Amino acid sequence: MADYPLIADHGLIGDLQTAALVTTDGSIDWFCAPRFDSPSIFGALLDIEKGGHCRVRPTADVFTRKQLYFPDTAILITRYMTEAGVGEVVDFMPVSSSTSASSRHRIVRMVRCVRGQMTFDVDLAPQFDYGRERHEVHLSEDGVVFAGTSTSLTAHLVLEPDDRRLAEGTIDENGHMHAQITLVAGQMRGMVLETGVAGPARRIRVAEVRGLFDETVAFWKSWLAQSTYSGRWRETLHRSAITLKLMTYAPSGGLVAAPTAGLPEQIGGERNWDYRYTWIRDASFSVYSLLGLGFRNEAAAFAVWLRDRVQEQAGGNGGPLNIMYRVDGSSDLSEEVLDHWEGYRGSRPVRIGNGAAEQLQLDIYGEAIDSIYFADQRGIGMGHGGWLRVAGVLDWLCDNWDQPEEGIWETRGGRESFTYGRLMSWVALDRGVRLATQHGRPAPVDRWRAQRDAVYTQIMEQGWSTKRQAFRQHYRTDVLDSSLLRATAVGFITPTDPMWTSTLAAMEDELVTDSLVYRYDPAASPDGLQGSEGTFSLCTFAYVDSLARAGQVDKARIVFEKMLTYANHVGLFSEEIALTGEQIGNFPQAFTHLSLIDAAITLDRQLDSGMPALRLPTPVASAPGLAPQRSATPAPASA
């Protein structure tokens, strides 16, 4: 398995409808078209032999590799340094349309020599439909066409009319193209990969490619200029914002959880899921984060996407909303296993689709209604029809919040009364009451308020563990769960309430390791899956946010700065961090970058306010693995 690059050894490019991963070795090893959730064209990330790739790298036996983004853009530059010269591959996807879905997508690969001389090897080996669709190959002087029964890929060569033949291509017995190209300092050639067009290949002039480059630079710089953030971590947050934009399906406003599928939460394990869909939860969080940075149009688009799902109410067993949808809003996410693929470094099974789509996860209603409320407070309101649908959802929640569910982490070990699901049910009902009263809209406000208060009382009575002196994962356990770190952010409990500071201390004892935070302990609270997982990066940033709100500002800052060291070479985060510090799980993950933005904004605000660090009472010693015990049970908090 040594041939697989590290998950972190990738950069991301995209055109707001799909995206591709490019390794530091110059290989595109993941690309699906025409959408994020379409079948793959390059999938070597999940099967290095059968998945397909497009690789450009020096022929030299020894070379140094570096990778970076062109400043303030999504244009990726992979640099190679040899004794004979320095070369670069510049990868980007032109953003041709941000409003209408298209089957035509282009990946530009500019290959250039910047010093001395360099010969590049080019290998182009697509494998359509996860390697299940056969194709024919048609080679010409201007490029090559790979034509399958339902998919096509055309490689147009970048050449000048008076070129000597800089490259000569051949097709092997597997239908893969191989070529070499030799360039001297100042020369630039390359290829443009195009989907949705069955050919023929055409010769593209260097000036045309430079024009595409300039247009793409202008697009990203213009977009980023909307940012209003001027805090301490400007470059980091702007990279996260660009990454989130790359994971947005512009025709609908939907945000995919990640552009990948099947990357493992444990190398060699079975926790391998397809994240190329839009979760209600992730889309809701994006409204807060992007409005916090000043990206009003994107936040409005996500809010509209959410409102459409609320208005359709096309949910299944999980109520009026599914937990996730395809990027266009459809809900067919049937899960299947690609038995013919070995998985990343042998991590099987490789799943596409997602069988958790119709789980009952009560927290999504709180996240959806809260984001609608948040957007409303910033001038992104809703019409009468939208309000009636929101009211319908809240009426359903009044009847259904008090039942077992699968929970935020999509466990497959059976339903439980998860405290976080109750917490977010409280949020949904509270925000519904606020929206109705602030705008004078018709609603059974007394009923919503009564149910909201009932949820609050139940959490305080049954979600609190006297033994652990902390809020617990669900009512039948004393295990902790870091999803509850959001309790202060949503206003359920004040950050300095003794019940909350005690919960923070207990979480630090059980879930925090060298500043990194686990979701929960699957050994103590079985989730129906085998194996373990790494620390969850979303939870680490939520921990930073919670510490900052609790006045532990110095501690929050060092945790935040430590976490930033786990980013990859171009500032991207996957879902989790392994014990070795390796990034694992789907990559890059939207949730992680969203929570990074939120934590930085909260930490900036607390630092700017000059809030002193709180002095917490010294905890009484406790047994290993248990939260510090307090001499008396704190009195219930008020929201």
Image: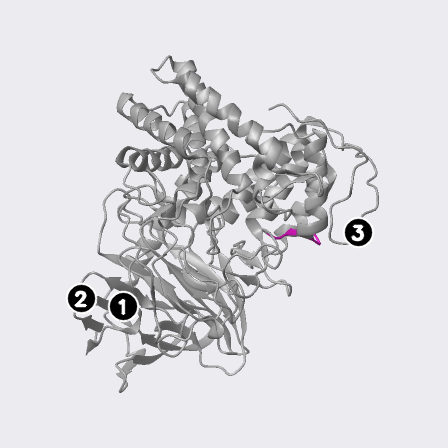
Residue at 49% across, 81% down? 60
How is this picture coloured?
one colour
**Bounds of the magenta segment:** 513-518
The percent position of residue 527, horizontal first and vertical second, equals: 52, 56
505 within the magenta span: no
Q: Which residue is mark 1?
A: 129
Q: Quadrant of residue 342?
A: bottom left
Q: Is residue 468 toward the left or the right of residue 435 in the image? A: right
Q: Identify residue for label 2.
A: 150
Per the image, label 3 sits on a secondary structure element best described as: loop
Which numbered marker is on residue 435?
none
Q: Position of residue 563 (x, y in %)?
A: 63, 51
**Neighbours of disc 1 within 10 Å: few (<14), some (14-19), many (20+):** many
Report the mark closest to the observer, 2 or 3. 3
Q: Which residue is mark 3?
A: 623
Q: Earlier in the sequence, mark 1 or mark 3?
A: 1
Q: Residues within 10 Å of mark 3 (few under 14, many from 20)?
A: few
Q: Is residue 103 above or below residue 553?
A: below
Mark sitting earlier along the chain (1/2)? 1
- The residue under label 3 is which amino acid type? Ala
